[in-house]
Amino acid sequence: MHGNDSLPPSCSSAIPLPQGHGVMRSLAALLLAGLGGCALFAPIGAPVSGGHVERHGKLHVEGLQLTDSHGQAIQLRGVSFFWILWHEENLKSSAVSFMRRNMGTSVIRIPVPAKDYANRSSTYDAQVSTMLGWARDNGMYAIIDWHMEDNPQKYHDVALEFWKRMASTYANDPHVFYEICNEPTGAGWSEDIVPYAKDVIAEIRKRDTSTVIIVGTPEWSRKIGYAARDPLKEDASGRPIRNVMYTYHGYASTHGMKADVEPYIDKIPLFCTEWGVSEANGSGRQDWARSREFVDYLRDNPYQKVSWTQWSWVDKRETSALLQPGTGGLSWQLSAAGDSNAVWASKPSELTFPGWTPAPPREAAPERTPEGTRTGRQRN
């Protein structure tokens, strides 16, 4: 681990009290807490007037494209929070309001640490509830991210319980996405990730038939070619797969970015839930040219408008951080990475592309996935 990151000591310190309507949600959640536990879940209200969710409704997948309730192709552009067990000063409702007002953010990502979840599940459940409340108050979409960098089978049983609770609580909530395995590592696609995904999707679909599910891919979610050649067809219960996307993660100073995505962008629906301007360890050199090329390609390629969230909302001293060091929880001063996110997320100002029609797919996916591994990867 980098720095002196430590686990949150209690629910009271781990979960900041939201403002506005979020206060009522938190009070309601406290009433639902189990004996000796923390606040669990907040009730779901209607989308706020004038927000993205009211305008575009619950999203779904048509072919390769994330699509709004009016049948328009949509591209969400936003911010991933840092692991929610560290740097709590950055976890505030004012952060999400700042993102909406100053950065054009339409989606946030909430990374729940799989490696610690079993130790304090009620704390993390309450934190998810609170942060979803902030997204709702600002009319944004939100990704619940099962954040792990390991073989997903390692957390199989804990993950099933987590997703049962999430799907039961947020079933068909128009604000929510489910990201079921952030970055599988040391895991094969067909032998590890696919069986895990089938099991988790089956449990989710028993409770929530429509929310979009995002599936990680091999080697820190960079080898999307495996999913392109052998996409999921049914879950463990035999239900056909629908409203499922796959994720690509990349860091501009280490990876191919556009070059990694381009061979497969006409094969499977993609949502780039994590990318950065830095090296793969979250710091080091920043590659602005490759970052801009990547962002432009996700929007302008002829096959799909790919949504994205950038890593990460933290004031840690590293070059992927969207905040200047030491400014978290105060004035929210953006770093160079944060300033660029604000430009890229806010242009174009509209999220949908009326009249746009995707080009037909090319030939079958290439047999080989682009080579390359991530080294020095530790973003704690």
Image (spheres, rainbow, N blue to C red):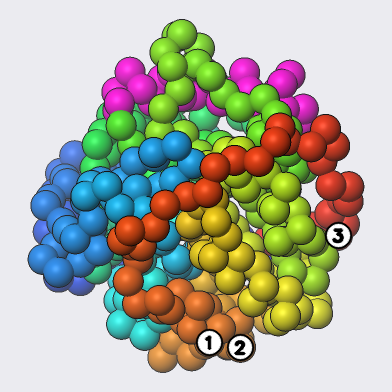
What amino acid does circle 2 point to? Ala
Tell me the CA gap for discs 3 and 1.
26 Å
| Mark 2 neighbour class, 10 Å CA radius: few under 14, some 14 to 19, many 20 or more | some
**Cβ atoms under marks 2 and 1 closer than 8 Å:** yes
Disc 3 or disc 1, which is closer to the eye?
1
Q: Secondary structure at mark 1?
A: helix
Give the residue pinned by disc 1. Answer: 339
Q: Which mark is residue 336?
A: 2
What amino acid does circle 3 point to? Gly
Q: Residue at x 39, y 38 (%)?
A: 62
Tell me the CA gap for discs 3 and 2.
23 Å
Q: Position of residue 196 (x, y in %)?
A: 60, 23
Q: Position of residue 346 (x, y in %)?
A: 41, 78
Q: Quadrant of residue 51?
A: bottom left
The question of residue 208 being in magenta is answered with yes
Q: Position of residue 242 (x, y in %)?
A: 41, 27
Q: Which quadrant holds the C terminus?
A: bottom right
320 and 244: which is toward the camera: 244
Q: Main secondary structure of the magenta part?
A: helix
Asked if residue 139 lies left or right of residue 178, the reply is left
Give the residue pinned by disc 3. Answer: 376
Q: Residue at x 73, y 74 (%)?
A: 290
Q: Which mark is residue 227?
A: none
Q: Which residues are magenta?
A: 183-209
